[in-house]
């Protein structure tokens, strides 16, 4: 655990991507199994340790520290793990050596629940502040050390010499502590075999189009275009004995959409957009939300909002891995497979007809509201299906955003490197003489603007609620958003889709912010 703590501390201090890769490569190369596998699971978010939750830790630290002192410290620091690591008094007795990651996990799993507080207290007593922070982060998940799962896998590629694409292909078929993976990376065995029709495969992603630069260098004859639908990206993985539906992050959402899963027939791995609507007519995203985050959907939702997949791509056709085929060939395989297979919840994505980027632009603008899509996808006809976001192959050209002037009502501390700043803001608009919230925004501003906003929040606070502050209803911010929908979850009755800060209106009085009628007119026009 001490070495893992040193790894995390170093990663926090390194800003360079290459430096982080170098540090992780060295750790994976020189650390033993299964320690390095558990560390990899922690860095990539695939490791889950039951029993250690935030409330457990709060109770534990309040037995050692005055409750008011802890509350004040937590309010100032903003991060639970960091607060506990700094405020924990430790022990004056001779400290024992910290256990390895493997022994640490074993002790947490095997210790009876009644004895767990004493065990965790002993661990924290024997650690310094950095080690305490590492143990808490490791136990609760969400390290937030500036390392994505893909960056960690890049470090594996760097130390082993194996291609990142090959690591990605098998990644979701292996679980921590990744012993078979490291044996292959160390050159001691062949690449692990996985069941491709029983596991998630990392998706290929697109870059936002740069209108001024990209269109000048791209030949429209080499690309195909499709509508970008406003649903959720999914992957259907199925054969005769296994039918599963995954989100873009690899979460299994099969139970939430039994109407789709039950109708999957044949053997394939498909990439597409999950939508709701009858006869393959997509309803707005707020209707899909009625089906999301439900373990078992009610019959009323199944009847009102039947789900289907608009299929974009095919990764496996029967037993054949076709990811290395060009997009054009994969499309032909997909069309042929759908023509031979009965799948009533699968609808193939339309290929748009255009002969220039100008004609595609006209088509995008013309159909933006009438079809309810998010824009268009532009894909190289020769592109292989590669995990991640390879440059120059796939592009997304989202429809132009809409804008509204809102008034800041509340501000909340951020996470990670933003934990010391008020960076998450709730905005409202006028309904008569009352401000009503329409959404939260925590992006779109520069580091300099964040500093200015944080300073304004601290100087204009009315009330404190833990990490949340109520502020004077004086600051107007121009919000950009993709669309607006009716919402029962907001007091205003409406909600903004993907709101972000576009411009801070220091010059505009709050009374001149937009009204609920503005949002309602946008919703009416879209419908």
Image (cartoon, rainbow, N blue to C red):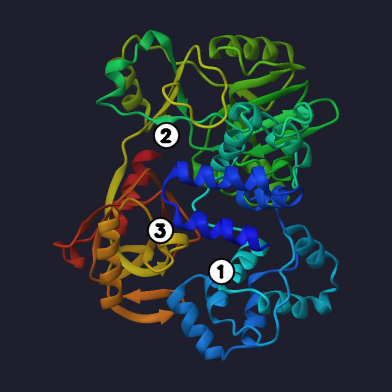
Which disc, if any, is residue 130?
1
Residue positioned 59% across, 21% down in the render: 313
Q: Is residue 31 left or right of residue 78?
A: right
Q: CA distance from mark 1 to mark 2?
A: 45 Å
Marks 3/2 in contact by CB < 8 Å: the verdict is no
The one of 201 and 287 positioned closer to us in this rendering? 201
Examine the rendered structure and indicate whether residue 426 appears above or below residue 126: above
Estimate how packed mark 1 is, as few (under 14), some (14 to 19) or many (20 or more) residues with alpha carbons within 10 Å. Answer: some
Q: Position of residue 338 (x, y in %)?
A: 68, 15
Q: CA distance from mark 1 to mark 3?
A: 36 Å
Marks 1/2 in contact by CB < 8 Å: the verdict is no
Q: Secondary structure at mark 3?
A: strand
Please name the residue that numbered disc 3 is placed on.
439
Examine the rendered structure and indicate whether residue 308 appears above or below residue 467: above
Residue 45 shows in this picture: yes
Question: Mark 1 or mark 3, which is nearer to you?
Answer: 1
Of mark 1 and mark 3, the one earlier in the sequence is: 1
Q: Secondary structure at mark 1?
A: helix
> Tag count in the figure?
3
Residue positioned 27% across, 71% down in the render: 455
Examine the rendered structure and indicate whether residue 271 appears above or below residue 286: above
């Amino acid at each position: 655990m001490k070495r893992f703590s040193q790894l995390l501390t170093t990663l926090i201090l390194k800003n360079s991507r290459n430096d982080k890769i170098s540090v992780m490569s060295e750790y994976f190369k020189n650390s033993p199994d299964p320690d390095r596998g558990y560390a990899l699971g922690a860095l990539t978010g695939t490791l889950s340790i039951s029993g250690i939750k935030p409330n457990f830790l709060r109770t534990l630290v309040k037995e050692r520290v005055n409750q008011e002192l802890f509350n004040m410290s937590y309010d100032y620091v903003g991060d639970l793990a960091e607060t506990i690591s700094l405020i924990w008094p430790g022990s004056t007795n001779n400290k024992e050596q910290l256990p390895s990651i493997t022994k640490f996990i074993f002790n947490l799993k095997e210790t009876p629940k009644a004895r767990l507080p004493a065990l965790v207290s002993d661990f924290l007593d024997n650690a310094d502040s950095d080690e305490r922070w590492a143990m808490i982060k490791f136990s609760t998940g969400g390290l937030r050390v500036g390392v994505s799962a893909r960056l960690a896998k890049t470090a594996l590629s760097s130390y082993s010499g194996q291609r990142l694409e090959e690591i990605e292909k098998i990644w979701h078929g292996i679980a921590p502590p990744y012993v078979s993976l490291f044996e292959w990376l160390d050159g001691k065995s062949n690449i692990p075999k996985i069941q491709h029709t029983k596991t998630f495969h990392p998706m290929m992603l697109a870059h936002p189009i740069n209108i001024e630069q990209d269109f000048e260098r791209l030949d429209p004859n080499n690309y195909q275009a499709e509508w970008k639908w406003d649903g959720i990206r999914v992957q259907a993985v199925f054969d005769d004995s296994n039918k599963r539906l995954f989100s873009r992050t690899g979460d299994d959402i099969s139970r939430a959409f039994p109407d789709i899963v039950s109708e999957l027939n044949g053997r394939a791995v498909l990439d597409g957009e999950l939508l709701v609507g009858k006869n393959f007519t997509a309803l707005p995203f707020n209707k899909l939300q009625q089906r999301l985050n439900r373990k078992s959907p009610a019959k009323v939702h199944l009847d009102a909002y039947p789900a289907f997949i608009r299929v974009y791509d095919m990764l496996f056709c029967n037993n054949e891995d076709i990811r290395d085929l060009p997009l054009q060939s994969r499309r032909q395989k997909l069309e042929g497979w759908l023509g031979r297979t009965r799948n009533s919840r699968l609808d193939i994505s339309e290929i748009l007809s255009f002969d220039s980027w100008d004609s595609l632009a006209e088509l995008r603008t013309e159909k933006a509201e009438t079809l309810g899509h998010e824009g268009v996808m532009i894909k190289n006809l020769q592109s292989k299906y590669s995990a991640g976001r390879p440059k120059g192959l796939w592009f997304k050209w989202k429809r132009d955003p809409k804008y509204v002037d809102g008034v800041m009502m509340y501000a909340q501390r951020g996470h990670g490197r933003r934990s010391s700043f008020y960076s998450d803001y709730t905005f409202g608009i006028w309904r008569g003489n009352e401000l009503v919230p329409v959404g939260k925004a925590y992006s779109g501003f520069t580091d300099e603007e964040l500093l200015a906003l944080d300073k304004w929040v601290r100087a204009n606070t009315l009330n404190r609620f833990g990490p949340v502050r109520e502020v004077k209803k004086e600051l107007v911010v121009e919000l950009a958003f993709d669309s607006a929908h009716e919402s029962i979850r907001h007091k205003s009755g409406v909600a903004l889709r993907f709101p972000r800060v576009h411009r801070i209106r220091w010059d505009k009085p709050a009374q001149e912010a937009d009204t609920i009628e503005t949002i309602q007119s946008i919703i009416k026009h879209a419908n």
